[in-house]
Amino acid sequence: MAFLPTQSSEASKKIAFLCGAGTSLSHKSSSCVNVPAIQTMTKNVEDEITTEDKYERAIKEIKKEIGETNYNIETLLTNIEEKRNIIGNGILNGLRRTDFDDLYGMIKEKIRELVSVHSLIHSNEDKNNLIHSDFAQWICQADRKYPVEIFTTNYDYLFEIGLEYKDVPHYNGFTGSFEPFFNAYSVEDFNFIPQQTKLWKIHGSLGWHIDELNKKVLRRNSDKNDILIYPSVLKYANSKKQPYASLMDRLTNFVKQPDSVLFVCGYS
């Protein structure tokens, strides 16, 4: 974060950060908790789902179809989604529709497991090792007229852990205590809780759930029903739905403001 004071020395500017997968991969030492990069994640998911012969054969065929160069967790999920939509009562890659449904579910659950690295953080030393804690410390020390806004595509809790460890008050679009609910109006209003750091998770988060009865997005403990935009071709369509549409509108409207600066971090 050493470059920020010089780059952002004008306290009146509105500053935001758009953070990709690299900010969850980033670490200060080998003992730091982090989320694996896409190739490592692909290998871990593949190892998990190929324990059954029919899935091992199917993945080998799909990998050949995609090609080694383009094969990763995103192209794999996209391939499976497309086949689920057209298979009907037929067989593709030796699998029926129910098999593709099961395979898709297993991949999503493994991804959720791999990003749930908060379960590995047990001490203040673990928290202090996080890059996110260093970032939170910079926010604490920055004397700014407007709060810092963080937009991230990551599902994990690393930003939350860093901000809380450094006692940084922040708002993430959810209102309430017993069952916090997503408040789209508060995301649209730039004057809502004007002094708090904002954390906007534009592809969803661990712990977000759909309450089908009341048609609300609630924040609860993380489980297999977390609503996340998984890496596949469908992420573009899903990002136009709520709550993601409100969060993307916030990003669009932020950069339209006068004297706004957007730092893009963690993208290759």
Image: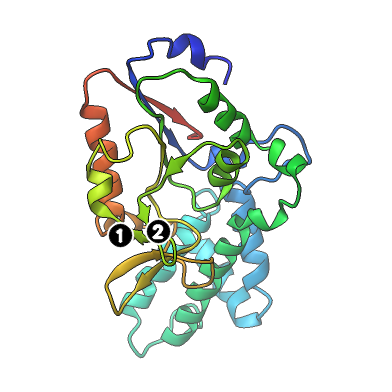
Please identify the quadrant where the N terminus is shown.
Answer: top right
Q: Residue 119 carries which label?
A: none
Mark 2, residues whose alpha carbon is within 10 Å: few (<14), some, or many (≥20)? Answer: many
**Side (left or right) of 186 relative to 113:** left
The residues tagged by marks 2 and 1 sit, at their Cα atoms, a distance apart of: 7 Å
Q: Which residue is drawn at 25% across and 53% down?
A: 184
Quadrant for residue 214, please give it.
bottom left
Q: Which residue is drawn at 63% across and 40% down?
A: 165
Quadrant for residue 34, please give it.
top right
Q: Where is residue 153 in the image (x, y as percent from the top left)?
A: 43, 46
Q: Residue at x 50, y 16 (%)?
A: 4
| Cβ atoms under marks 2 and 1 closer than 8 Å | yes
Q: Position of residue 218 (x, y in %)?
A: 39, 65
Q: What residue type is labelled 2?
A: Ile
Per the image, label 2 sits on a secondary structure element best described as loop
Q: Where is residue 182 in the image (x, y as percent from the top left)?
A: 33, 58
As displayed, is residue 128 above or below residue 98?
A: above
Q: Which mark is residue 229?
A: 2
As displayed, is residue 241 above or below residue 145?
A: below
Q: Which residue is drawn at 70% across and 45% down?
A: 33
Per the image, label 1 sits on a secondary structure element best described as helix
As displayed, is residue 33 above or below residue 90?
A: above
Q: Nearer the viewer, residue 211 or 75?
A: 211
Quadrant for residue 112, please give it.
bottom right
Q: What residue type is labelled 1?
A: Asn
The total number of labels drawn is 2
Q: Earlier in the sequence, mark 2 or mark 1?
A: 2
Furthest residue in direction bottom, as rendered: 89
Q: Position of residue 131 (x, y in %)?
A: 63, 34
**Side (left or right) of 42 relative to 19:** right
Q: Nearer the viewer, residue 248 or 167?
A: 167
* Residue placed under numbered mark 1 in the picture: 238
